[in-house]
Image (cartoon, rainbow, N blue to C red):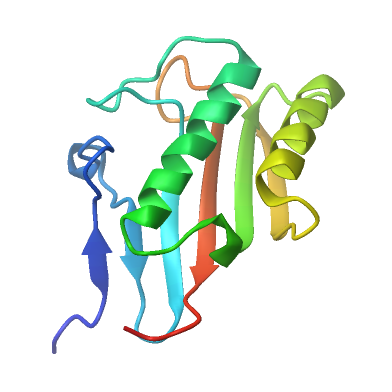
Amino acid sequence: MTDARTITNPPGLHDPTPFGYAHAVEAPGQLVFIGGQYASDESGRPVPGDFAAQVTLAFDRLVTALEGVGLALEDVVRLGTFIVDHDMAKLEILGKELSARFGDRLPAQSLVGVAALALPGMLFEVEAVAARTTVR
């Protein structure tokens, strides 16, 4: 049995394999799944910063992962977002970032408030599903 998936770990993002995941996995057909992106340095360590700064950098990393498979934010059809110690102030920050990034073409989204994420210092994480309009 051959594996029809295409796994991509784009340059400009840390090597995620020691952490047990891939940045992007393209399924046969048109869907591309982007693993959780967060405010990370080149080695995958969380970058210190306040919540707003981490949200912005996580979305920058998401853009890099999408570009690595020839896609962009406008191809995203679903987001999953995870917020440590979620509250309304953080929801407002996320909403502003989403509006700035997606305008009025917002994808479907689920937001999960969590006690902690994978690594100490992570305050926010975003994953995505994108749809390729043309099959490679």
Residue 123 falls in which quadrant of the image? top right
Q: Is residue 110 above or below residue 95?
A: below
For the point 54% across and 42% down, the residue is: 126
- Residue 26 visible to the viewer: yes
Q: Quadrant of the N terminus?
A: bottom left
**Percent x, y of residue 79:** 62, 54
x, y percentage for residue 17? 19, 44
Query: Height in image: 133 above or below 53?
Result: below
Q: Report the label total.
A: 0
Q: Quadrant of the C terminus?
A: bottom left
From the viewer's perspective, is 95 left or right of 49?
Answer: right
Q: Residue at x 24, y 35 (%)?
A: 14
Q: Is residue 45 above or below residue 73?
A: above
* x and y percentages locating residue 23 in the rendered image: 33, 50
For residue 129, side relative to residue 103 (left or right): left
Which of the two residues, 87 or 104, is positioned nearer the viewer here? 104
Q: Position of residue 84 (x, y in %)?
A: 63, 24
Residue 116 appears anywhere in the view: no
In the rendered view, does 87 fall on the left or right side of 9? right
Q: Residue at x 33, y 63 (%)?
A: 69
Towards the viewer: 108 or 69: 69
For the point 74% across and 57% down, which residue is it? Answer: 106
Asked if residue 93 lies left or right of residue 25, the reply is: right
